[in-house]
Every structure is written in C-alpha cells, then in structure tokens.
C-alpha cells in the first residue's frame, strides 16, 4: 500500500488537507484527520497539491497510419508527464476507424503501448451507419461525427445518415462542427484575393464564426429533435454560446460542450507571432471570442476543457497557409497552461479540476475515475504550484519535438502522476514498462 500523506487535495469543489491510502489500483481510504497505524510506503506531500488524473476527451495520437509524427506510446508518455491519466482518441487515422474490427485492433494495440488509460471513438462516415450502430456503450467512449472537412472519408454531410446517427446512436455522439460549404466559399474568395501568399491571420475568416455556428446549431437542433446524447467539441465563438444550457445539472444534460486549451489561451492577434504553429481547425478567433469562451466555462455553459492534441512535424507546419496542416501537440502542457489562469486569478483550482477531471468523467459516465473517492481507481496527480520552468527542446516529450509553448515559462509543475495506483511519472522519471487500462463506462 501507498500513503500519500498531508496533501492539499482539490476535489469535488473543495480544497482540504488530507491523506490518501492506495491499495493496489484503488483508493482505499481518505483521511482528513488522524491517520491510523498503517503498513504502507509513505510519500510526504506536505505543501503539494493532489488532484484527480486529467481525462482528455479529445486527442489525435496518429496511430495507426501516421506514426512518423506521433504514436500511442510516445504521446501517452507525454500525457502522463502533463498529468493526463486517461485519454479518448479520435478515429481519423489511416485507415479511418470505420469498422468495429478496426476499432478493436486499436484497443488491442493500445494494451501493449499506452502508459495512460485509453478509449477510442468509433468513426462515422456517410456510408457506415450499420457499423456505427454496433458500438458498445460500455467499453467505447462515443461516436465521432465530422460535420465539417476532415481526414479521409469521414465528412458526414448526408442528411439521412446524420438523422440515422442522431436518432439511433447507442452512445454519446461527439461532433466537430464547421460548415463545409461556407469554408469552401470563403477559401475560394480569399484565395482569389491573396493566392498562395495567403496570410495565416485569414484562417479565422475562412473557417469563420458563420461556418461554426451553422454547423453547431444544426447539431444541437438534430440532438433536440432526436433526444441524442450530444457532446459538441472544441467550440470557438461567442455566438455559439447561445446554443448551450447552464441551468441543468451536468449529469442530467443531454447536450454538453467542450473548449480546448488553445482557444482559451490564444487569439487572432497571435497569428502574427506564432504563424502556422497555432493553425487549428476550428480556428483560433478573436479576443472577444476567447473571453466569451472563458466566461461560458465559468458560467457552466461549457462543461469540459480538452486539448485536441494533434501533432504535425515542424517541417510540415513550416509551410504556406494552404500546405501547413492544422493541429498541434498539447497534452503535456494542458494542465500547466490552465494553472496560469489560476495564477492570474481568472479561474479557481476547483474550477480547473471540475472541467478537466470531474466533468469529462460525468459527461462520458467513465467508470470509477475522475474523482478522488474511496473505491475509485487511484489516478492521481501531484502538483507544485510554485516551481517555475521553461518549455524547451530538452523537456518537450512529443514525438514531433516542438510545442506551441516553446520558450514559455510556466509557474507550476507536475511532479508525480499515478495511474491505477502505480507511480508512472516521478519528477522526470517514467516507469516505462507500465501500461494503462481500457476505460469502461457506466452506460
């Protein structure tokens, strides 16, 4: 057994001084007062903060098919170093995950590679509804629908297919919402004006507020008509916030929303500094949009913070607007990025833990994770809130070797990460042989 002694625990909207006893994979006891005489290995956490492991509901680990820029082994390792103990990976792989057989192959592969706990979305296309409806809600996180351009044969724009998915889906439907026709029209107009010398700052005007709102409002409308369990991913605009409810308790919501770290950190003025490094789909938009997203998070219109971790090589990103792919690596730096909001007084520690740990567990009904509670798996993260460090090539763990935060100083550091009771990351050292577990869901 392991006793994490005298920690400052952030959990369930409380901050308390307590100790946590781990027995094997499980949290056996939480002691707020006197600790009985226990035969356990003691780790003194005096002055340190203890939170539940982060559950990132949107990553692209590029495995299978694009493993020259990321794979399950490398990116789960980076995730662990950032306090992410569980992740849900997207199906736009090569080949796209459009059959139950391909989906199960990913799970089999992850069991031998992943240092963190894992789940994988079933992918939808215009012509695989029968396969989508076979998805098992108890051991698959959800169904991913790209209602906008995507990698491979995964754009779902057939009205009958969309209706079939929204009316019959056996589990949560997660959507990427951007209107393809609007994007095509904007692209043609801006290309005619600028040609191949398109400034990167045009990206949020091409993948515009209108493109996002048209698609996300359609998804919400379909969900309401069909009583679908809908989760709208990576929202970017103030206008979209009118689509979401903050009066219903999260566990009772049928329609939930997510914001990603980069849309809370960057705005459209940052394109001049970072260029294609911050080219994402949907696009980083205005400072007014960024502030509206933060306020919606505080107001509980937005439920979850995630990353949309999507690595590309530096060479791929160092291209003109049309050639540079969208996406960037984030899982190692998501928690420390959000802790900067705490240091500025913009978010509380309780809010950060709620949106990164509790809410993903509640949204997806993840079994026995997301909270520090007796009987739950011991997915736990130790944080030093006052240990400054700077991101550079020597400490970036992504396979691509770069981060949009290169050169940035963070005020807080992840010191230890426990996955299922095992100390997998400890001040830069990894238990390289450890493998996480497949997530299960109480659905």
Image: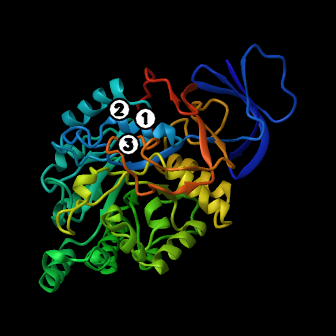
Query: Would you say 393 lies left or right of 128 here?
Result: right
**Secondary element at image label 1:** helix
Residue that badge 1 annotates: 77
Q: Is mark 2 in CB contact (under 8 Å) with mark 1?
A: yes
Give the position of the C terminus as an image quadrant: top left
- The coloring applied to the image is rainbow
Question: Which residue is located at x 56 percent, y 57 percent?
Answer: 338
Q: Nearer the viewer, mark 2 or mark 3?
A: 3
> Please, is residue 331 above or below residue 368 in the view?
below
Badge 2 or badge 3: first in the primary sequence: 2
Q: Residues within 10 Å of mark 2 (few under 14, many from 20)?
A: many
Which mark, residue 398? 3
Q: Nearer the viewer, mark 3 or mark 1?
A: 3
Image coordinates of residue 252 in percent, x first then y, are 53, 57
Question: Which residue is located at x 43 percent, y 44 percent?
Answer: 396
Residue 138 visible in image: no
**Secondary element at image label 2:** helix
Residue 145 visible in image: yes
Residue that badge 2 annotates: 73
């Amino acid at each position: 057994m392991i006793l994490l002694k005298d920690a400052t625990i952030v959990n369930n909207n409380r901050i308390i001084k307590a100790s946590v006893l781990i027995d094997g994979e499980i949290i056996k006891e939480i002691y707020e007062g006197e600790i009985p005489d226990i035969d356990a290995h003691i780790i003194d956490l005096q002055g340190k903060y203890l939170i539940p492991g982060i559950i990132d509901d949107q990553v692209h680990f590029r495995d299978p098919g694009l493993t020259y820029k990321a794979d399950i082994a490398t990116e789960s390792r980076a995730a662990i170093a950032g306090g992410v103990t569980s992740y849900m990976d997207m199906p736009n792989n090569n080949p796209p995950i459009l059959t139950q057989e391909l989906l199960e192959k990913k799970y089999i592969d992850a069991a031998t590679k992943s240092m963190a706990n894992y789940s994988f979305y079933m992918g939808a296309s215009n012509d695989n509804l029968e396969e989508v409806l076979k998805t098992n809600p108890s051991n698959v996180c959800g169904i991913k629908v790209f209602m906008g351009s995507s990698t491979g044969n995964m754009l779902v724009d057939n009205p009958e297919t969309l209706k079939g998915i929204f009316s019959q889906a056996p589990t949560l439907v997660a959507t990427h919402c951007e209107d393809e026709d609007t994007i095509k029209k904007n692209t043609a107009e801006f290309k005619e004006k600028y040609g191949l010398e398109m400034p990167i700052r045009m990206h949020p005007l091409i993948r515009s507020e209108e493109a996002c709102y048209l698609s996300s409002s359609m998804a919400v409308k379909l969900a309401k008509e069909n009583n679908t369990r809908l989760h709208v991913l990576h929202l970017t605009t103030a206008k979209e916030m009118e689509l979401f409810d903050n009066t219903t308790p999260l566990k009772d919501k049928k329609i939930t929303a997510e914001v990603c770290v980069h849309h809370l950190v960057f705005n459209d003025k940052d394109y001049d500094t970072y260029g294609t490094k911050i080219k994402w789909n949907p696009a980083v938009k205005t400072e007014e949009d960024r502030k509206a997203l933060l306020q919606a998070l505080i107001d509980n219109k937005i439920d979850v913070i995630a990353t949309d971790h999507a690595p590309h090589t530096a060479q791929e990103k160092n291209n003109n607007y049309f050639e540079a792919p969208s996406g960037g690596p984030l899982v190692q730096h998501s928690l420390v990025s959000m802790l900067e909001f705490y240091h500025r007084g913009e978010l509380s520690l309780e809010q950060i833990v709620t949106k990164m740990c509790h809410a993903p567990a509640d949204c997806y009904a993840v079994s026995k994770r997301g909270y520090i509670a007796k009987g739950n798996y011991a997915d736990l993260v130790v944080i030093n809130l006052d240990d400054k460090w700077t991101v550079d090539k020597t400490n970036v763990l992504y396979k691509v070797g770069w981060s949009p935060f290169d050169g940035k100083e963070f005020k807080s550091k992840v010191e230890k990460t426990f996955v299922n009771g095992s100390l997998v990351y400890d001040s830069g050292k990894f238990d390289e042989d450890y493998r996480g577990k497949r997530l299960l869901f109480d659905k």
